[in-house]
Amino acid sequence: MLSELTANAVADAESRRAERSLADVEAAALARPAAIDALDALAPGARVKVIAEIKRSSPSRGSLASIDDPAALARTYELGGASAISVLTEGRKFGGSLADLESVRAAVSLPVLRKDFIATPYQVFEARAAGADLVLLIVAALDDATLAELHGLITELGMTALVETHSADELDRAAQLGARLIGVNARDLSTFELDRDLFGRLVDRFPDGAIRVAESAVLSAADVAHYRAAGADAVLVGEALVTGDPIANLSAFLAV
Ligand SMILES: O=P(O)(O)OC[C@@H](O)[C@@H](O)c1c[nH]c2ccccc12
């Protein structure tokens, strides 16, 4: 499933490239005002930080919310106290787009994450051209050489990579890369199984100084407390915020 999602995302980027060359997208990326420092926004603090996600649907959960106005939802997240906004830009299974990211970027002053299946430099330039400050890199989807190349490019463009892992071996590869912001996804992207305890089992392998993000499977404040007790600096939350009351949920999550 993960390799199919990635292959499709790359194919979709290739079709966009037929319309807009790499040189054009690169120029647009370089013309953007500097990216916001996400490491600063997500730095460990007395309170857990929330990365609030905009996601219409997913292959594991089906349709979640129509989200006609992603910019308005992003403003709500900002008002509610989120530290960063994650925007799914994958179109086929998650119902997102780069246009969503651009409108969110224009609406908030928080750092914005491009959440997609990124495997080529073109997609990284697209992210910056749309105003992203962060780009997701999924370790399981990339070989070490590609991971290093994309991580280097993201950093060179002034952005921050959120390096996503799902095993001890992947966490070691993220550490090897010099990643400063590392997530453990509770959802296995090949089987879609959820394991809320995976973060706690892997937390000791995070390199010193890296920001520790627990991703997925937060439905209640108790889940945030569970991740926080295990050592999470930040949690990445989608479903609970797009299906429930975002302000009420954020305030409960931030009170943990
Ligand atoms: O909706 P949830 O369970 O709160 O999960 C959010 C986020 O972690 C999830 O959307 C996600 C994590 N990693 C991904 C990679 C690709 C697509 C989506 C994801």
Image: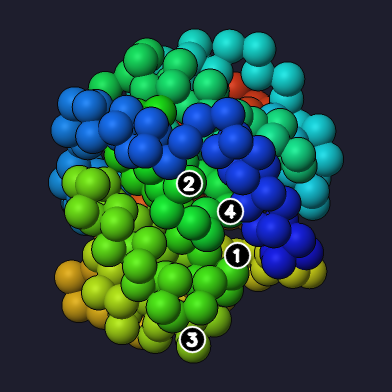
The alpha-carbon separation of the residues under discs 1 and 2 comes to 25 Å
Residue at x-position 38% and y-position 31%: 24
Which of label 1 and label 4 is nearer to you? 4
Q: Nearer the viewer, residue 178 or 223?
A: 178
Q: Is residue 93 left or right of residue 142?
A: right
> Local crowd at mark 2 within 10 Å, few (<14), some, or many (≥20)?
many
C-alpha span from label 2 to label 4: 9 Å
- Dot 4 beta carbon under 8 Å from ligand 1: yes
Q: Residue at x 54, y 23 (%)?
A: 100
Q: Nearer the viewer, mark 1 or mark 2?
A: 2
Q: Which residue is mark 3?
A: 168
Q: Quick one: 123 or 90, which is closer to the camera?
A: 123
Left or right: 191 as drawn, with respect to 6: right
Tag 4 residue: 117
Name the disc covering residue 123, or none.
2
Three-letter amino acid code of the residue under disc 4: Phe
Decide if ligand 1 comes within 8 Å of the CB at mark 1. Answer: yes
Residue picked out by circle 1: 186
Q: Which of the two discs, 3 and 2, labels the residue nearer the N terminus? A: 2
User: Which numbered disc, 1 or 4, marks the residue that appears first in the sequence?
Assistant: 4
